């Protein structure tokens, strides 16, 4: 089965900073990659699908890129409400594996 | 509005059986797979498997296969996740999600606590 990794596992950044999270698949998955945001104590929320398509209602400071095995989630101008754990997930075929998550907080 | 409403908190003992539910509304229930996601306390998201409500076809994750079962009752737009013998390690929050490719909609979660 394809394994998903993320880096870093956690990061601390200042309000207004640009933040980049990387997700890597152990084999190519095309662009069947989603990003989710889970705020503390809350239900996860879909941010981005097909690697770069923003889900309706998600602020435009979030963006995604990549294809094949390497993907990135970028938050331009980090805001306090972006404190959360971010997960990538492959969905080209079962199992729909999640990455281990990246915890983002404010410095 | 698409909604997934899950059953409530469960407190069980090791060895007991359990079935939790996820009821979909606001969309064509048989047109979208439903997946189950586990989140153990303080840990990340783990995909457990998915079920096609149209024909009950199921994909289980390697770690879930043989330990849980999934089923559907189309007449009431409800998907189930079931254990025949719970273990303390099953203590977790369980989410159902509607798959539109990715998991576009999530239930509110069902907290399952298993004591030994």
Image: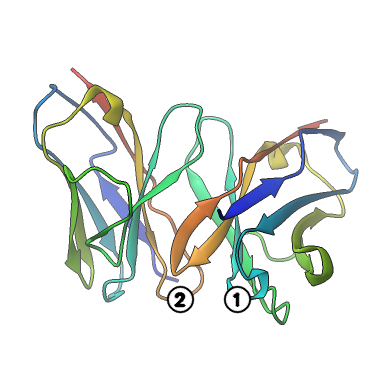
Q: Is residue A101 visible?
A: yes
What crowding class fits label 1: few (fewer than 14 Cα within 10 Å), some (14-19), or many (20 or more)? Answer: few
- Which chain does the residue under circle 1 lie in? B
Which residue is denoted by mark 1 in the rendering?
A: B31
**Chain letter, disc 2 residue:** A
User: What percent of the width, then of the height, locates residue B17?
Assistant: 89, 48
Assign the N terminus of chain A to one quadrant of the image.
bottom left
Query: Residue B68, can we see it?
Result: no
Name the side, left or right, on which A41 lies relative to A82: right
**Which residue appears farthest toward the right when viewing the image?**
B16
Q: Are marks 2 and 1 in contact (CB under 8 Å)?
A: no
The vertical placement of B111 against B98, above or below, is above
Q: Are marks 2 and 1 on the same chain?
A: no
For the point 60% across and 65% down, the residue is B27
Q: Which one is nearer the viewer's eye here, B27 or A100?
A: B27
Point out the image quarter for the C terminus of chain A.
Answer: top left
Query: Could you say where residue B96 lies in the image, as x and y percent from the top left?
Result: 62, 53
Answer left or right for B111 relative to A88.
right
Q: Which residue is mark 2?
A: A93
Taking the view exactly as shown, the residue that stands out farthest to the bottom is: B55
């Amino acid at each position: 089965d394809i394994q998903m990794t993320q880096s870093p596992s956690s990061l601390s950044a200042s309000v207004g900073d640009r933040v980049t999270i990387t997700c890597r698949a152990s084999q190519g998955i095309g662009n069947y990659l989603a990003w989710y945001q889970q705020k503390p104590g809350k239900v996860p929320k879909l941010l981005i699908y097909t690697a770069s398509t923003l889900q309706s209602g998600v602020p435009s400071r979030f963006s995604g890129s990549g294809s094949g095995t390497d993907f990135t989630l970028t938050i331009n101008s980090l805001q306090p409400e972006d404190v959360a754990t971010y997960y990538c997930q492959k969905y080209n075929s079962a199992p729909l594996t999640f990455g281990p998550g990246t915890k983002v907080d404010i410095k | 509005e698409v909604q997934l409403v899950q059953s409530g908190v469960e407190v069980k003992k090791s060895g007991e059986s359990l079935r939790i539910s996820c009821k979909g509304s606001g969309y064509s229930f048989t047109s979208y797979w439903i997946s189950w996601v586990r989140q153990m306390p303080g840990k990340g998201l783990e995909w457990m498997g998915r079920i096609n409500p149209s024909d009950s076809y199921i994909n289980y994750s390697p770690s879930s296969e043989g330990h849980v079962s999934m089923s559907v009752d189309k007449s009431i737009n409800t998907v189930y996740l079931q254990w025949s013998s719970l273990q303390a390690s099953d203590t977790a929050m369980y989410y159902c999600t509607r798959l539109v490719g990715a998991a576009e909609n999530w239930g509110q979660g069902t907290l399952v606590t298993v004591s030994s």
